[in-house]
């Protein structure tokens, strides 16, 4: 524990600083997520205990807290796809989706795949789970995790490129019945809302969009300058 962090604890959490500092030196159990497509909580607990690890139940079904006697990835159960390592906060985030069989779910920035695995397991590998990742080099981590855990819809893993986003946005809009929606629709909406919410500051929006001139930005968002808008608004009140 560094001196600046210790000083920060003492200044901001005087009652709990000592306990917080001590926690940095205590070994904590590793949270894992049981893969119900491959095993049960009880069977995996027994397997891990036979391997020499200490296992206790976590706060939710299919969640175990394990004091591993070595690297979790060295476990035969890990290689058999019976669990994946995932912190409690990440498990909770995935569980909040309340994913169910037959649903269509999108997980953006999905690598290395923990949340996607938890969601797919909740869906019982039935439905459509789109797992996107902006860093193309990490896409293979998603595919490896899906293959190891027996998730068959690995064809829905995709790199987050402009073309891929356009493609999958079109699928979602078609499913919802929306027409003529593209990524530029969201960019234009964002620019327009920023423009309205900041006193019709076209220079601000120009910087945000990285346009070469305010005139370009004005044409892009298609809204008249503040002076003209106020004149129109005043004219409408006179009428």
Image (spheres, rainbow, N blue to C red):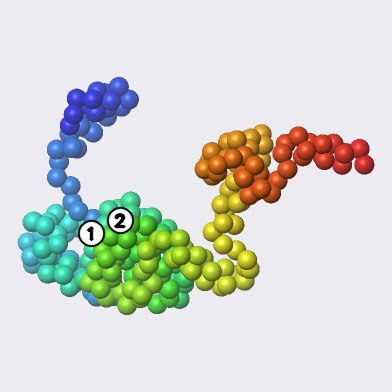
Between 25 and 73, which is closer to the camera in this rendering?
Answer: 73
Q: Name the residue under label 2.
A: 59
**Residue 16: x percent and y percent?**
27, 29
Residue 218 can be seen in this image: yes
Q: Residue at x 56, y 52 (%)?
A: 187
Query: In this view, which residue lies farthest toward the right?
Result: 239
Between 162 and 18, which is closer to the camera in this rendering?
Answer: 162
- Relative to 48, 4 lies left or right: right
51 in relation to 18, above or below: below
Q: Dots 2 and 1: beta carbons under 8 Å?
A: no
Which quadrant of the figure has residue 40?
bottom left
- Relative to 153, 209 lies left or right: right
Label at residue 85: 1
Residue 34 can be seen in this image: no
Between 232 and 95, which is closer to the camera in this rendering?
Answer: 232
Disc 2/disc 1 C-alpha distance (Å): 15 Å
Q: Residue at x 52, y 43 (%)?
A: 210
Q: Which residue is drawn at 66% across and 34% down?
A: 199
> Is label 2 in a helix, a strand or a loop?
loop
**Residue 32: x percent and y percent?**
23, 59
The quadrant the C terminus occupies is top right
- Relative to 107, 184 lies left or right: right
**Residue 87: x percent and y percent?**
27, 53
The quadrant the N terminus occupies is top left
**Label 2 Cα crowd, 10 Å radius (few <14 / some 14-19 / many 20+):** few
Query: Of marks 2 and 1, which one's residue comes earlier in the chain?
Result: 2
Callout in the foreground (2, 1): 1
Q: Residue at x 26, y 63 (%)?
A: 141
**Label 1 Cα crowd, 10 Å radius (few <14 / some 14-19 / many 20+):** some
């Amino acid at each position: 524990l560094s001196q600046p962090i210790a000083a920060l604890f003492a200044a901001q959490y005087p009652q709990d600083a000592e306990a917080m500092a001590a926690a940095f030196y205590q070994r904590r159990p590793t949270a894992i997520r049981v893969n119900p497509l491959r095993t049960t909580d009880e069977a995996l607990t027994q397997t891990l205990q036979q391997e020499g690890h200490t296992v206790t139940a976590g706060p939710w079904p299919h969640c175990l807290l394990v004091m591993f006697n070595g690297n979790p990835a060295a476990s035969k159960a890990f290689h058999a796809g019976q669990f994946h390592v995932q912190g409690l906060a990440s498990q909770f985030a995935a569980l909040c989706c309340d994913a169910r069989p037959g649903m269509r779910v999108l997980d953006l920035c999905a690598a290395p795949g923990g949340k996607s695995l938890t969601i797919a397991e909740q869906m019982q590998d039935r439905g459509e789970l789109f797992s996107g990742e902006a860093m193309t080099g990490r896409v293979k981590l998603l595919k490896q995790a899906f293959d190891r855990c027996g998730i068959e819809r690995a064809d829905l893993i995709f790199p987050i490129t402009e073309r891929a986003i356009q493609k999958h946005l079109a699928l979602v809009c078609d499913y919802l019945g929306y027409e003529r929606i593209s990524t530029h629709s969201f960019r234009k909406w964002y620019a327009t809302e920023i423009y309205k919410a900041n006193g019709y500051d076209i220079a601000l929006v120009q910087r945000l969009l990285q346009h070469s001139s305010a005139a370009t930005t004005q044409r892009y968002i298609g809204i008249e300058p503040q002076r003209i808008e106020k004149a129109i608004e005043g004219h409408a009140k006179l009428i």
